[in-house]
Amino acid sequence: MSIRIERANSQIQKAMGLILQNKLNNPNLNPMLYISEVNVTPDFKYCKIKVSLDSDNESELEKNIKILQNAQGFIKHELAKLVNMPSVPKLIFVLDKGTRATIRVNEILSKLNIPKEDGDDNNAE
């Protein structure tokens, strides 16, 4: 991945965080919603934004993605103010399944009753 694309991804992710926190005043939008990853296409025409919640509630997350899609024009307008790019790409909001899988694995691991190992440093001879 080129440095330009990486820089654009980083700038868009930071700007999206600011927009979600400060600009998008929708009471139906979950305040725990966050942008987990941003991927701009090499031609800078499209930007896939992966959205996640620290929750297993898929319907809640889908509702929030629809809110973001409906507010896409406003978000794109605000993004143009915050990001130094010739043109703002079309925003595509998608569900981040990786984060949800990580949450699920951590829940399963926390339920396992694995005994802690005694200090292995003391057994070294």
Image: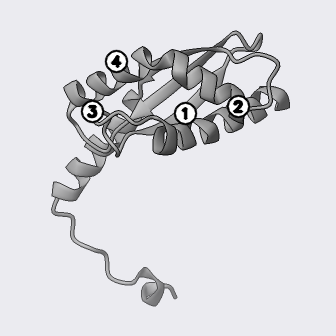
Residue under label 2, please give it. 81
- Image depth: mark 1 or mark 2 in front: 2
Specify which label sits upstream in the sequence, 3 or 2: 3
Which amino acid, mark 4?
A: Lys
Task: Calculate the distance from the C-alpha at mark 1 to the C-alpha at mark 2.
Answer: 20 Å
* Rendering colour mode: one colour
Specify which label sits upstream in the sequence, 1 or 2: 1
Residue under label 4, please give it. 66
- Image depth: mark 4 or mark 3 in front: 3
Crowd band around label 3 with a 10 angstrom C-alpha radius: few (<14), some (14–19), many (20+): few
- Image depth: mark 3 or mark 1 in front: 3
Which amino acid, mark 3?
A: Asn
Give the secondary structure at mark 2.
helix
- Image depth: mark 1 or mark 4 in front: 4
Which amino acid, mark 2?
A: Lys
**Is residue 94 in view?**
yes
Task: Calculate the distance from the C-alpha at mark 2 to the C-alpha at mark 4.
Answer: 23 Å
Label placed on residue 28: 3
- Image depth: mark 2 or mark 4 in front: 2
Task: Calculate the distance from the C-alpha at mark 4 to the C-alpha at mark 3.
Answer: 11 Å
Q: Check if mark 3's residue and mark 2's residue have beta carbons within 8 Å.
A: no
Q: Quadrant of residue 25?
A: top left
Specify which label sits upstream in the sequence, 2 or 4: 4
